[in-house]
Amino acid sequence: MRTKYISMTALTLVAGASLVALAGQPPRPASGSISGKITYTGTPPKMKAIDMSKEPSCVKQHPTPVTTENVVTGKNNSIQYAVIYISSGDQGSTAPTKALKFDQKGCQYIPHVLAMQVGQAFQIINDDPTSHNIHPLAKVNPEWNKSQPPGTPPLNAQYPKAEFIPVKCNVHPWMHGYFIVLNTSHYAVSDDDGEFSIKDLPPGKYTVTAWHEQFGTQSQDVTVAGADAKGTNFVFKAVPY
Amino acid sequence: MRGTRWNRWAGVGLAAAVLLCAGAASAQESHVGKYSGNAKAGKINYRRYCIGCHGPAGDGNGENAPWIDPKPRDFTAAVFKCRSTPTGTLPTDQDLYDAVTRGFDTTNMPPWMPLTVVDRVNLVAYIKTFSPKWKSDKAGAPVEIPAESPVTIESVLHGRELFQKMECWKCHGPEGHGDGPSAATLTDSKDRPIPPYNFSTGTRFKCGNTNRELYRIFMTGLDGTPMPSFADVIKPADAWDLVHFLRTLQPLVTPEATVWKAWVTTHGNELKPIGPEQAPGVGQ
């Protein structure tokens, strides 16, 4: 399998070198994908209503009170904001140049969990009429803490090392999110139906890991052979506290 | 002939040895002014004077730590409050030396001036052995502090506006009493409660008591605490105005307080209170 892949790459390279007209990189045989669903069994903890009364400008932005987001569940026991990534196997390409966005709106982080690659640029935006301080509690990466008053330009940031970093705002203690910095470019965050899909995977053997901030991590081995490895599901055991 | 070859090999060996030492020892050394510190020498004094609070592993879990608040610094995290360098960067050796020398007012950390300069520089070198970050990362470039603007009532009043606009009062309180709406919920990076500075106590600031050092706090932030850096969002001239206003919140005789008192006695009723934006007509 592997030898075949290497020899094919070599062939492509030779062909590419001999044909001067053929510019650019050899095409990566990346046709496979891994998809599935994140669900729970048991009783998940009830999310608490957030009292934003100390920040009237944020109260105004929410017609209905918002709750904490450490366990966001949907239909059929699905779980949102789980991060699914390739922990072993092809690690993909270097980070795309387009910056990701992390918004502060209504005294909440959007998205609640931002997954990114090592060295990938991202922008932190304040869309509120109040000041926030962005305080990612990094341990391996540098720990910084910056104020962002309303109307100031986006903050540009990136992390040089892989780490799962909790993010908080000290002014608004209910604000809580995560920066998930990964070595791989193959990752996904589960959507509001708990579904995810990791695309552009070359055929091969992989270890897929799913992480959830409350329920921990799970891994399974998946072989991708060109087509979609559907049904790579993860079931977390939920406890109500 | 034989001699030259021998010399050549010796030279190569020596160069390699020097390179190896430089690589391995850089994190074990410190440089403050004309002094160079050595971790091995620092360890002796660390084990005598510092270990009781900061612990044998430098993680802040010494045997006295449970009875101390604020807690002793955890050197393994390599996160420091008092720096001359931007938020998220390592402090300079001089910063660490200044911290050991100055101590931290209102904490259990005394000034270590009884130790000789060389002893303190050696301690800095030893403190840097507790985290691998001192090998992988470089200290940040110190933030530039421009010359202080004159203390005028305009400067103080503008500083007061910024205190409102930058929302300093959310933690430090409308009158700087450390009782803002967010004060009670503040925690440090280890999730331990931490109070914002209360200006009405008039105690010395932890990172030095000059106006320059107060200015520096806005620009560097106090890493590991809720106090953020304002370096990207406040202009130098504005920061000096804020410094001048903050001095008026302390019950001290300062040039700023004198200017302020003279003005307030005649204009006090013109001031809008600091705090949440109020609907027109309310509180007037």
Image (cartoon, helix red, strand yellow):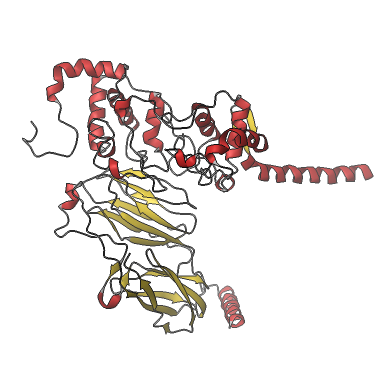
Task: Write the residue at 45% across / 38% down.
Answer: B68
Task: Write the residue at 45% across / 80% down.
Answer: A31
User: Looking at the image, which is closer to me, A136 or B253?
Assistant: B253
Is residue A87 left or right of A125 when viewed as pictured? right
Is residue B24 left or right of A48 when viewed as pictured? right
Residue A146: quarter of image = top left
Q: Is residue A158 visible?
A: yes
Quadrant for the C terminus of chain A, please: bottom left
Q: Residue furthest left?
A: B281
* Position of residue B258 measured from the top left corner of the image (x, y, whole percent): 27, 15
* Position of residue B99 measured from the top left corner of the image (x, y, whole percent): 50, 31
Q: Residue furthest right?
A: B2
Q: Is residue B30 visible?
A: no
User: Looking at the image, which is closer to me, B128 or B19?
Assistant: B128
User: Looking at the image, which is closer to me, B205 or A147?
Assistant: B205
> Where A234 falls versus A119 (above or below)?
below
The count of marks equals: 0
Is residue A7 left or right of A111 when viewed as pictured? right
> Where B66 falls versus B107 (above or below)?
below
* Position of residue A125 measured from the top left corner of the image (x, y, whole percent): 30, 52
Task: Write the residue at 30% across / 30% down.
Answer: B238
Quadrant for the N terminus of chain A, please: bottom right
* Position of residue B64 measured from the top left corner of the image (x, y, whole percent): 51, 39
